[in-house]
Amino acid sequence: MLQHYTVAAVLSLALAVAPTVSAEGGQIALSQTQQARLGVQTGDVQAAERQALVVVPGRITPPLDARLAVAVPFAGIVQAIHVLEGANVKTGDSLLTVTSNDFLEAQARLSRAQADYRALKSAAERLKTLSREGVVALGRAEAAEAEATRASAELAATRRMLDRAKPVAGQKGTYSLVAPHDATIAQLQVMPGEMIHTLDSAVVLEGTGALWVEAQLPSRFLGKITLGDMVSLQPSGAGAKIIAIGRTVDPQSRSVTVRAELDRNDSLRPGQSVQVTVFGVVEEGAFSVPRDAVVRLAGGDAVFVAERGGYGVVPVTVLSRGAHQAIVTGPLSAGAKVAISALTELKALALEGD
């Protein structure tokens, strides 16, 4: 009762200098002055192209192929770390330094492999020449060529291992682990002073491209969405395109995993929680109106449609509600204006006309 008197008092004050307000046949007569005093604002009615099916929690993730674990090529003690999480690195930048006897031995193996290859290659070429002259058997020359080929393969393998380790000038047996490509540091998996073994992951890199959002979609909505459909993220307002829809329903949650690629990253970060509005096919003749425009009136949903001399009360059926828009059906037309503020006052006026 107190609330009724409060609304009535507000209406009386707002309309004190205006003609009497009438509400007949679902029509609320309001002059421009009365509307201004009530603070009525409007939003657009649009033909609906898509419908919000459900809002579910989601999590921002990097693409599955965007992360790379960088392993150390040689066991040793982590001497220093040169990067922190979130830092951007370029190809060849030093990530950390490791003191390693294995690295020292690998450098020695490289020197031996280079010397062995040069000797075997020279011997193979000499025997090949002698074979052509008939001085030695062809089989001997071919065996020497095979040994040179083996030495070449061992040399290449040793070089590939050492290419991943950059020697530190003036520090014998110490190498830097370098970034294999431009990326962002996602995770450090070692600390200075720790022992790290060959092929252990030391740093996780993350590409700087698009991010994904991952959410669990209730299985009852399967068949209502397709690849390429859009979802909306809150509170950022970013959009994302569905790129994967799971085929296996989780027996406990009765949901499937849906992944979507963001059309822009803005300030979103991997691991961040968001609310995901999933959209699907809308039924024919549906309209999109501002979510705030829909009110409960006389046991049903309605909107106040702007018309000459006031507002008409139009009953609607709500199909879905998104973060900002509601999808409705009813006797509306695209391009019409609906009230989105002073709704309590308009409801009171509508009820007075009943």
Image (cartoon, grey):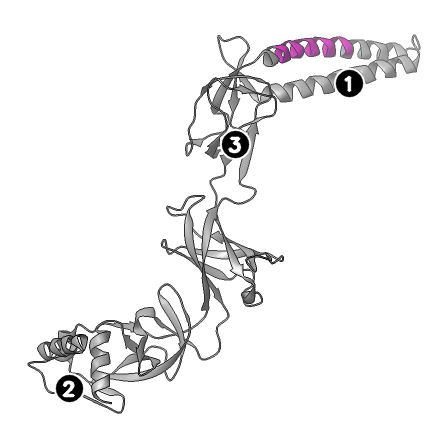
Q: Does the image show residue 211? A: no
The percent coordinates of residue 169 (x first, y second) are 49, 11
Question: Which residue matches tag 2?
Answer: 21
Q: Amino acid at mark 2?
A: Val
Q: Residue furthest front?
A: 1
Q: How many other residues sit within 10 Å of disc 3, few (<14), some (14-19) or many (≥20)?
A: few
Does dot 1 land on a helix, a strand or a loop? helix
Judged by its main secondary structure, the magenta piece is: helix
Q: Residue at x 33, y 77 (%)?
A: 335
Q: Judge from the rendering whether residue 107 lies leftward or rightward of residue 51; answer left or right.
A: right
The percent coordinates of residue 146 (x first, y second) are 82, 18
Q: Does the image show residue 19? A: yes
Q: Residue at x 32, y 74 (%)?
A: 294
Disc 2 to disc 3, C-alpha distance: 71 Å
Q: Amino acid at mark 3?
A: His
Q: Judge from the rendering whether residue 41 lies leftward or rightward of residue 283; answer left or right.
A: left
Check whether the beta carbons of the residues at disc 2 and disc 3 lie within 8 A of each other.
Answer: no
Q: In the rendered structure, does residue 289 fall within the stretch colored magenta?
A: no
Name the residue nearer the viewer: 208 or 20: 20
Question: Which residue matches tag 1?
Answer: 150
Quadrant the C terminus occupies: bottom left
Mark 1 or mark 3: name the one nearer the start of the chain.
Answer: 1
Q: Amino acid at mark 1?
A: Arg
Disc 1 to disc 3, C-alpha distance: 31 Å
Does dot 2 land on a helix, a strand or a loop? loop
Does dot 3 land on a helix, a strand or a loop? loop
Question: Which residue matches tag 3?
Answer: 181
Q: Residue at x 41, y 32 (%)?
A: 87
Count numbered badges in the picture. 3
Q: Which residues are magenta?
A: 105-120
Disc 2 to disc 1, C-alpha distance: 99 Å
The percent coordinates of residue 130 (x first, y second) are 88, 9
